Amino acid sequence: MFNVFDPAQLAHAPIRELHNGEWVAHVETPVRAENIVAAIGVVAPARDFGVAPILAVHDAGYVEFLRTAFGRWQADGRSGEAIGYAFPVVARREIRLDRIDALLGRYSYDAATPIGAGTWTAAYAGAQTALSALQPLLAAEERHAFALCRPPGHHAGRDYLGGYSYLNNAAIAAEAATRVGRRVAILDVDYHHGNGTQDIFLHRGDVFFASIHADPATDYPFYWGHADETGTGDGRGATVNLPLPHGTGIDAYRVALDGALARIDAFAPDMLVVSFGADTFEGDPISHFGIRTADYRMLAAVIAGRALPTLIVMEGGYATDALGGNVLSFLRGFSST
Ligand code: OKP
Ligand code: ZN
């Protein structure tokens, strides 16, 4: 296993999020990544592939917004983190927006994803971490690589942030692999539906997306991830959503994983990108599945059994003290094959 981590990702340290009607301490903390590094040991630094592979996935106006939003916020005399409070839920015509609050609403969809002084630096480093971990797979020097990305990315779409996500690390790596001829399937096993990744590839038949997640009827992100979302246009049939109820344990989860992998098998990819969230863990403070630490190793071994070059991209997981052990268990499931 080739592990990549860029410590510049620690620069993002969100303070608070809106949760159950109150401002609470943000759960997506730098110490999450530090605990994972402590558990897995050796990590390679990221290389810098520049902004081009980011712009291959994300809208240029959005990327410019993300890069400049905190400065604009401060220039308007604001303190604290930049966060929107008005969101254009009904698509509006394209007009020039100058007010920082207007831009925040235009490019985001929730109040859980603030922009602070280090957000752009960290998100950029996260994308480079994913691209760096991809390289030894493209060169056939490694079979499995782990991108220790933080903040997560799978809720970020082409032109929006949300769900603690700013740049879609998994999508950026998948697109980069596609552009050098790989046939990529993305398997999202975070507790939450990967709406950003789904949106980015929904209309495309050349990248397969399968997600196992908490039913959006009861869980964030609510508006995406229902079983009848299966792709549009050229992408019809290349999106699979397997929502599961609260209380799902390893047995039902394993059945869903086998189902997702059977669909991926039928697509016949030559590379796999796994969006891995350890928030399916039984002790996760914001989630409701019952996966145990040892289960992650078994689930990973099932995935590794497909014998595909596999990039594992870190997404969520908020039981911070158990996070390192859960990630280590998952990575061991790949190393044992
Ligand atoms: C990011 B990732 C808490 C509900 C959830 C946003 C969750 C983002 C999860 N009020 N809020 O997929 O782990
Ligand atoms: Zn999650």
Image: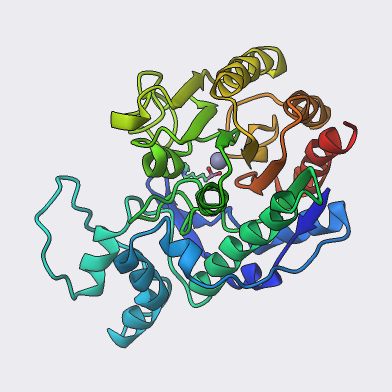
Where residue 44 appears, x then y in whole percent?
80, 65
> Residue at the front extreme?
181
Foreground of the two, 91 or 73: 91
Q: Is residue 60 visible?
A: yes
Q: Is residue 148 visible?
A: no
Quadrant in the rendering for residue 169: bottom right
Q: Is residue 270 left or right of residue 63?
A: right
Q: Quadrant where the C terminus lies?
A: top right
Q: Is residue 46 left or right of residue 3?
A: left
Looking at the image, residue 301 lies above or below residue 153:
above
Q: Is residue 115 left or right of residue 278?
A: left
Where residue 215 appears, x then y in whole percent?
46, 23
Looking at the image, residue 21 lies above or below residue 300:
below
Looking at the image, residue 72 lies above or below residue 139:
below
Where residue 3 appears, x then y in whole percent?
79, 55
Where residue 231 appears, x then y in whole percent?
36, 28
Question: Measuring 65% from the left and 16% from the top, which residue is drawn there?
Answer: 258
Question: Measuring 35% from the left and 19% from the top, which residue is drawn there?
Answer: 228
> How many numbered tags mark residues here?
0
Quadrant in the rendering for residue 23: bottom left
Foreground of the two, 67 or 306: 306
Q: Is residue 218 left or right of residue 34?
A: left
Looking at the image, residue 235 lies above or below residue 242:
below
Question: Measuring 40% from the left and 22% from the top, which residue is drawn there?
Answer: 237
Question: Measuring 66% from the left and 63% from the top, which residue is drawn there?
Answer: 30
Q: Quadrant of ligand 2?
A: top right
